[in-house]
Amino acid sequence: MASHKVLVIDDSAVIRNMVRDMLPKGNFDVLEAKDGVQGINLVRQERPTLIMLDFLLPRMSGWEVYQQIQAQPDLQSIPLVLMSGRKEEVTEKLQEPFEYFEFVQKPFDQKQLIEAIKAAMSKAKRRPAAVAAPAAAPAAAATGDTSGEMAALKAQVAKLQAEVDALKKQQAQILAFIKSKLK
């Protein structure tokens, strides 16, 4: 039985088949989606252990699929590899360095694919725990469960710290850009 369920969301049957063929035999159960709508539905239904997401998709773009995944704490922890033939389209929406997902440029070979998958899994493990629904904290306080409330607050602090760190990186990039233009 396959130990990993991989969802490949790409409008190209060639890319979907190529990914299937490049993965080690027996370790992966490969699910396929040919557009963003089908892809996000499979993410919710199947809860894959890895998502390979093309950035340019019909019906719902890869960017929109990415946003929906990031909006749901239970989906954020799934390792994600974004794929595109044009990296600038990805970096236009998402600033480098990519903290919680990996990017692989099309066309890619087996070695690049395996490295991207390993990096995505590593990044997903380093991601701070998602914050539980806000309603959980008042319920915990009403029952006197301060450990649950404390854990939720710690998760919230970790998420905020990650956002602050990302903003600091963006600010440094903007300053470097401005300095380069002033020269």
Image: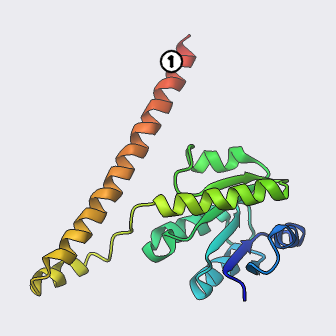
- Image quarter where the C terminus lies is top right
Q: In the rendered structure, which amino acid carries the disc numbered 1?
A: Lys
In the image: residue 120, left or right of residue 165: right
In the image: residue 44, left or right of residue 145: right
**Relative to residue 12, is residue 39 depicted above or below?**
below
**Relative to residue 149, is residue 183 depicted above or below?**
above
Residue bearing mark 1: 179
The picture places residue 36, in percent across and down from the top left corner, at 68, 73
> Is 94 in front, or is 6?
6
**Relative to residue 122, is residue 105 depicted above or below?**
above
Q: How many marks?
A: 1
> Is 182 in front, or is 76?
76
The picture places residue 167, in percent across and down from the top left corner, at 40, 42
- Image quarter where the N terminus lies is bottom right
| Residue located at (59% from left, 63% from top) | 121
Classify residue 24 by image quadrant: bottom right
> Is 123 in front, or is 38?
123
| Residue located at (32% from left, 75% from top) | 132
| Residue located at (77% from left, 69% from top) | 10
Classify residue 29 by image quadrant: bottom right
The picture places residue 163, in percent across and down from the top left corner, at 38, 51
In the image: residue 132, left or right of residue 176: left
Classify residue 63 by image quadrant: bottom right
The picture places residue 33, in percent across and down from the top left corner, at 75, 78
Q: Secondary structure at mark 1?
A: helix
